Image: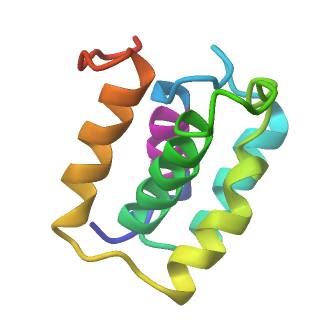
Amino acid sequence: MNPPEDLNEYADAVMKLYLQLPETPLKPSANDRQTAESLGARRIDLKAVESAMLLGTIRRLSRSSDMPPLSPIRSLAYFLPVIEEVLFNPVPDDYLQYLRKKVGLLSCGGKTIQRR
């Protein structure tokens, strides 16, 4: 899935991915929109963005229960370091489906659900 030619379409797609994740806000901020647009301006593939968001979420949700809880994610910028990591070391195409399922399982104690 390549970045759409239309920056608004790309930013909408990124916002949709972001808002579907557990522990993210119900509504995006203006800064979130700007971050999404900057990713589109860099022509970052949506699969890479989604993979990074899912990896970041899995890392949060699979933290040891002995650790103090993390505060909710408040900004799309939270995922920027993971996006850079995925750009440097891409995940295989067939791994994305696994990441989606894993987030679903971790976010609801073993039951696959959709947040919204």
Q: Where is residue 35 in the image (x, y as percent from the top left)?
A: 74, 53
Question: Residue 37 vs residue 54: left or right?
Answer: right
Inspect this view and state whether residue 60 appears.
yes
Say how the picture is coloured. Answer: rainbow
- Answer left or right for 50 relative to 84: left
Relative to 104, 33 lies left or right: right
- Residue furthest bottom in the image: 88
Task: Give residue 45's position: percent from left, percent from top.
Answer: 42, 71
Q: In this view, does 56 lie to the left or right of 51?
A: right
Image height of 65 relative to 12, above or below:
above
* Residue nearest the observer in this picture, 65 or 14: 65
Q: Residue at x 54, y 37 (%)?
A: 18
Q: Magenta residues: mostly which secondary structure?
A: helix
Residue visible at 41% across and 14% down in the picture: 115
Quarter of image, res 102: top left
**How many numbered marks have been drawn onto this rendered protein structure?**
0
Residue 4 against residue 91 in the figure, above or below = above
Residue 110 lies in quadrant: top left
Q: In which quarter of the image is residue 113?
A: top left
Q: Which residue lies furthest to the front in this view?
A: 66
Residue drawn at x 68%, y 20% is 25
Q: Can residue 42 be seen in this view?
A: no
Q: Where is the N terminus found, in terms of image quarters?
A: bottom left
Q: Which of 116 and 82 is in front in this view?
A: 82
Q: Which residue lies furthest to the left in this view?
A: 94
Residue 8: image x %, image y %?
54, 48
**What stretch of residues is rendered in magenta?**
9-18
**Does the magenta segment cover residue 48?**
no
Query: Image quadrant for the C terminus?
Result: top left
Give the residue at x 78% y 38%.
75
